[in-house]
Image: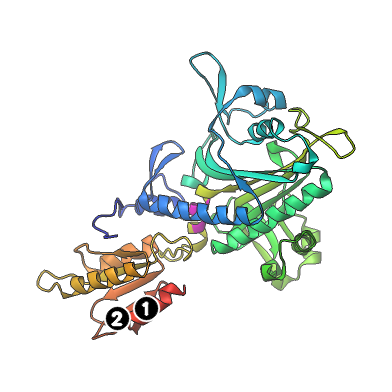
Amino acid sequence: MYLSKLFIPTTKDVPAEAKIKSHQLMLRTGMIKQSSAGIYSWLPMGFKIMKKIEQIVREEQNLVGAQEMLMPTIQSSEIWKESGRYEDYGEEMLRIKDRQGREMLYGPTNEELVTDIFRSSIKSYKSLPQILYHIQWKFRDEIRPRFGVMRCREFYMKDAYSFDLNDDEAKKSYNKMFYSYIRTFNRLGLKAIPMAAETGPIGGDLSHEFIILADTGESQIYADKRIFEINLDNYDYSDNSLKKMRNDFSLMYAATDEKFNSNEFEKKVKKENQIKTKGIEVGHIFYFGDKYSKPLNGLIDTQDGKKVAVKMGSYGIGVSRLVGATIEANFNNNVMKWPKSISPFDVVIIPSISKNNNENIQKAEKIYKDLKKQNIDALLDDVDENMSNKFKKHDLIGIPYQIILGSKSVNDKIEFKELNYKSELLSLEDIKSKLKNK
């Protein structure tokens, strides 16, 4: 892609309404544009990053046997009345009526709808376990939307739902999703701490939040830093291994302020291992048993001929929120560096452009075409402006690698830089090798 052709409406000014780095950066680099309070259009670069996150989430869900589907954004109120949540959910739920006067709602979550799908389709224990998920837009009418995509009204979310015969089997599904979440955040270049949490309006008796460290986070967290030393390579997808994995994480102290116990923290964690900082929630998992299947008659036939309510769990990841959270975790000293797995481009080519000399732009175009042949996604900055402005702009955009065609590039050696590191002179073949092995 040529920068001159890319729809990326950048601005030098920090918008007055943007209070945190991710909101400022996403507006300044043309990733999003506000449509109304808490609702955004996702412009090409921001959308590309979000779709890369979505794909990683999808791959890790598929690996634990979850099956993708798609449920509608608009739901009938009837199933919510069956579960008892229609009046209880509060003003965050956007309630509407169609032209026939039927009460509808814009889905804030999907426990009721997926239970309705299950109860009409699965009747026997032989079809269990099942894990279904979808990635869909949600709407919650926040009283005060703020912080850009971090706390908005319309957001893109992955939510999964497990169905099991009994509590023991359900906890195996829970462990699979726990493992899947840790793997997902690792692939996104984020260090996420799983913390026992309150279940909130979804209900249940087992819940974990996944929180990444960030100074701008809303949650105060306390943890043992040795939790980051737990190596996922030591576990596999077998039930016993996953049970051990979750137990190993549970042994490490980790709590938000609502569950924090100062005496317990000081007793369990040595001073040098204590983390006291803020964090951002990027995922939440719940086990709530038959909270929804009982009132909605989500019953299955057991092996001995009885009918029992299926045991359920719910598992959410804010896909659009992760774009902002990743910025908050990685932005430093006016430089943004996207993790390589979700960067909008693999590399940017930055030539020094002169009216009297088009040698650099010709060389840049040749390199660009060569990289494209190697399936390396490159951005060519063909905009005529001084190099200082180019570097400031690309420090904000955050593409992790830069090929710089300026005074330092000589003969067959080209200046190559990874953000936050010193540049080096390499041949094009060496650069391609580095990019392919990233």
Where are the magenta residues, as a range? 322-326
User: Horizontally, is 58 left or right of 391 in the view?
Assistant: right
Q: Provide residue 400's location: percent of width, then percent of height.
A: 41, 68
Amino acid at the residue labelled 2: Ile
Q: Give me the residue at 27% from left, 68% from top.
A: 369
Residue 386 tag number: none
Q: Is residue 130 visible?
A: yes
Magenta segment's dominant SS is: helix
Among all residues in the image, which is located at the extreme bottom? 411
Q: Could you tell me which residue is drawn at 26 percent across and 82 percent down?
A: 409
The residue labelled by disc 1 is: 431
Q: Is residue 374 left or right of residue 169?
A: left
Q: Report the amino acid beneath label 1.
A: Ile
Q: Quadrant of the N terminus?
A: bottom left
Dot 1: element: helix
Q: From this viewpoint, which residue is outermost toward the right? A: 304
Q: Residue 414: give its label.
A: 2
The verdict on residue 323 being magenta is yes
Residue 318 drawn above or below residue 293: below
377 with respect to 244 (left or right): left
**CB atoms of marks 1 and 2 within 8 Å:** yes
Give me the residue at 67% from left, 30% from top: 116
Q: Is residue 192 above or below residue 315?
A: below
Q: Is residue 252 above or below residue 7?
A: below
Image label count: 2
Q: Residue furthest top?
A: 100
Residue that sits furthest to the left in the current view: 356
